Image (tube, rainbow, N blue to C red):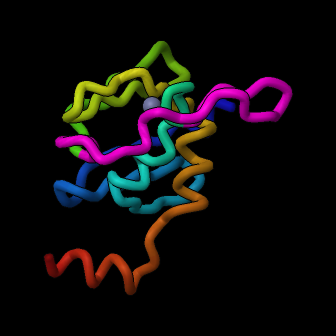
Amino acid sequence: MKYLKPISIKRTKPFLLYCEWQDGFSGTIKLETFRNECPCALCKGEEIAGKQVAKPIFQMMTPGKNDLKSLEPVGNYALQASWGDGHNTGIYTWEYLREIFEKFSLSAKQLEELMDK
Ligand SMILES: [Zn+2]
């Protein structure tokens, strides 16, 4: 599982997050997406045996919600994200991070459009 740890993480724009892995895979996603995919129980709801039993309560738009304040390593297995609205319970494991980037990475065309902003 060690190879899933990214070799580079940077913000290429205030609203874009870039990640690169040892195997050559890289991608850029919107911070908005990164926040929406926050894996904590508040955002995703509690799952028991694959069934959602608690409704997410963090779905509303709060000031600073998609403003990433920091990404701190947790041990050697994950990153903890802190957001402008004070939310910081999301722990993104290397595996989950890679999953998000494989799923939501922007296309070259989308990036080009965003880079003009
Ligand atoms: Zn969360």
Vertical arrangement, residue 1 with respect to residue 25, above or below: above
Vertical arrangement, residue 115 with respect to residue 64, above or below: below
Q: How many marks?
A: 0
Place of residue 83 in the rendered image (x, y in percent of width and height, measured from the top left): 26, 33
Identified at 48% across, 65% down, the residue is: 105
Task: Mark yes or no: residue 24 visible.
Answer: no
Q: Which quarter of the figure is the N terminus placed in?
A: top right
- Left or right: 48 as drawn, with respect to 111: right
Residue situated furthest top in the rendering: 75
Q: Is residue 114 on the magenta stretch? A: no
Of 70 and 38, the residue lying toward us: 38
Of 41 and 69, the residue lying toward us: 41
Place of residue 19 in the rendered image (x, y in percent of width and height, measured from the top left): 41, 51
Of 45 and 26, the residue lying toward us: 45
Place of residue 69 in the rendered image (x, y in percent of width and height, measured from the top left): 20, 34
Q: Is residue 59 on the magenta stretch? A: yes
Of 10 and 50, the residue lying toward us: 50
Place of residue 26 in the rendered image (x, y in percent of width and height, measured from the top left): 48, 60
The residues colored magenta run 44-66
Vertical arrangement, residue 79 with respect to residue 14, above or below: above
In the figure, residue 111 lies in which quadrant?
Answer: bottom left
In the figure, residue 106 lies in which quadrant?
Answer: bottom left
Task: Mark yes or no: residue 27 visible.
Answer: yes
